[in-house]
Amino acid sequence: MKQTIMAVDIGSSNITCLIAEVVEGSPKIIGSGISKSQGIRKGAIIHIEQAAQSIKSAIEDAKMMAGVEIKRAIISISGVYAKSRNASGVVTVPSGEIGVNEIRRSIHGALHNAMIPGEREVIHILPYQFIIDDQEYVDDPNGMSGSRLKTNVHIVTLPKTVLDNLRRVTKFIGIEIESIVLSSYATSIAVLNDDEKELGVACIDMGGSTCDVMIYSGSSMCYDEVLPVGSHNITNDIATVFNTPFDSAETLKIEYGDVAYQKRENQDIPPLKIPSIGSDDKKRVITLQELSKVILYRLAETLNFLYMMIERNELRPQIGAGVVFTGGLVKLKGTEEMIESIFQDYPIRIAFPKAIEGLDESLRDPSCSVAVGLIMYGSGGFTNYEIDSEKRLKTKRSRLSQDDMREFSSDSKKREDIASVFEDEIPKQDEEQKPQKKGWFQKFKDQFL
């Protein structure tokens, strides 16, 4: 049976829409559209009409390319305002055989034990560990024997106001929401392989306004957090330091930005003339070395905070497969070298979204990981069991009937030279929180300065 699905990634830089035909769980991309984000900041709606027009533009382009009319969409949402917690639910199994009902009841019990505040709404309940009696390593308890089932789950919530505004925007343009998916979860579906999920892995999506971090353990998400810094902060730094318009700063970053510029050999690029704010005629001359230095400090700071996020929360034992990086920021020249320098004690991989039939080569890009992940999610790429944003129990077991999709209701070192112009977006780390090893600044200084 053929099914048509639509995915919309609401990013801080771009809105990306993909439409796919799905046959027996295999998607084929038949339409795509990309528009610039407007009315959106750090993943949240700040202007209904602007956001609506931006989203509508991407959707209309994708529908025109696909030649289909579709009114339902799977939509991403940033984790900036997300809060997550882990909880457990335990049920007895009088019959001695565990079925979907027991799994549902144990998940329900975990949600009850989590005591979610009334002003927040659950968008994901993801079981990451099943324990039958004393047997801890169970991938799928359905059909197994046992007298007691314990389910450990990861619960993701967002403020109801944030979700209400998203729903207002989609209603404004005549789109119904099929599911709302945390962007970091969608990214992980698009870029992680089965071995990484099984061993445990950190997935970091470095985007325009945020860096989304999530941890997979036991083939399911068990931790997520957001660093509210992204490539836009680099653009802002360039604009501030060189007193140049934002558009000019963005062009400088994309066309000439190179974190490792000073390591390159045979660089003979003349100084650049750039416009100054408030004057069409006045030009300023800068060197690529000066530009590289501005980018380097912000990127090094960002990567250090990401590194400390993993260390501070003692997540190292859970990520045997290392750290996977994706997102638009990883495309910046020299970023991979800096990642390897700061995360030198972890296995590192720069990831592109998995190949899907019909996916244009231009879309097989780290910046499109979320959109591809949404399509894969809609094609059955979620975890074995999950409660989605619409309170439905989703399962990969195709033999289960639609009756099983029932509603699930629930009540550092100081930066030098240009430090004075950088805006402090994040509190500084306490000294005792830093690992007792060579500092991040010294790491990249040894390599890049």
Image (spheres, rainbow, N blue to C red):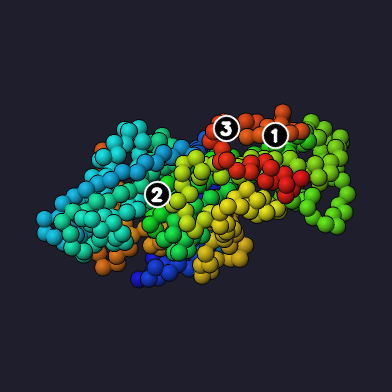
Image quarter for residue 429? top right
**Crowd band around label 3 with a 10 angstrom C-alpha radius: few (<14), some (14–19), many (20+):** few
Q: Which residue is mark 2?
A: 222
SS of the residue at dot 1? loop
Distance (Cα) linking label 1 and label 2 = 34 Å
**Residue at far top of view:** 420
Quarter holding the C terminus is top right
Work out whether 283 lies above or below 198.
above
Does the CB distance between marks 1 and 3 fall below 8 Å? no
Residue type pointed to by label 3? Glu
List x then y, in percent, for residue 193. 47, 63
**Residue at far front of view:** 436
Q: Which residue is mark 3?
A: 431
Q: Is residue 348 visible?
A: yes
Quarter holding the N terminus is bottom left
Q: Which residue is mark 1?
A: 415
Q: Residue at x 76, y 33 (%)?
A: 417
Distance (Cα) linking label 1 and label 3 = 16 Å
List x then y, in percent, for residue 416. 74, 34
List x then y, in percent, for residue 190. 49, 59
